[in-house]
Amino acid sequence: MFEAIKHNLETIVGVEIYPIISLTIFFTFFIGLGIWVFSYRKETIDEVSQLPLDN
């Protein structure tokens, strides 16, 4: 089964760029998410964490 998939992928011209693009998008997203999380202000996090307890 994998032989047929491997053969099909080897015959597509330019297919080697797709894993590189996918990896770049993956790392860019998670680096951006990490920057966003670590740059969040402590006061905002405390305010949001108290929302479920407020009535």
Image (tube, grey):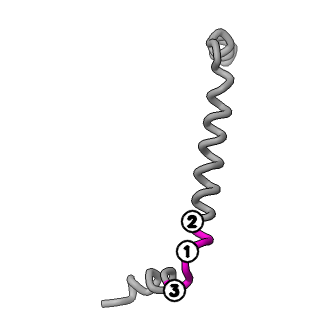
* Classed neighbour count for the residue bearing mark 2: other residues with Cα under 10 Å, few (<14), some (14–19), many (≥20): few
Q: Quadrant of the N terminus?
A: top right
Residue on which the image places disc 2: 36
Going by the numbered disc 2, the residue's amino acid type is Trp
Q: Is residue 30 above or below residue 21?
A: below
Highlighted magenta segment, given as a residue range? 37-43
Q: Say which residue appears at 62% left-offset and 28% top-offset.
A: 18
SS class of the residue under badge 1? loop
Amino acid type, mark 1? Tyr
Question: Mark 2: which secondary structure?
Answer: helix
Q: Quadrant of the C terminus?
A: bottom left
Residue visible at 60% across and 43% down in the picture? 25
Front residue of this view, candidates 27 and 5: 27
- In the image, residue 26 above or below residue 6: below
Instruction: Please tell me which residue is depicted at 57% across the width and 65% down the height of the picture.
Output: 36
Q: Quadrant of residue 16?
A: top right
User: Do the numbered discs 2 and 1 sit on residues whose CB atoms are within 8 Å?
Assistant: yes
Q: Point out residue 42 in the picture as x, y percentages from the top left corner.
A: 56, 83
**The residue positioned farthest toward the left in the image shown:** 55
Residue for badge 3? 43
Query: Residue 40's spot in the image, x, y percent?
Result: 55, 74
CA gap between label 2 and label 3 equals 15 Å
Q: Which residue is mark 1?
A: 40
Is 52 on the left-hand or right-hand side of 12? left
Q: Is residue 1 visible?
A: no
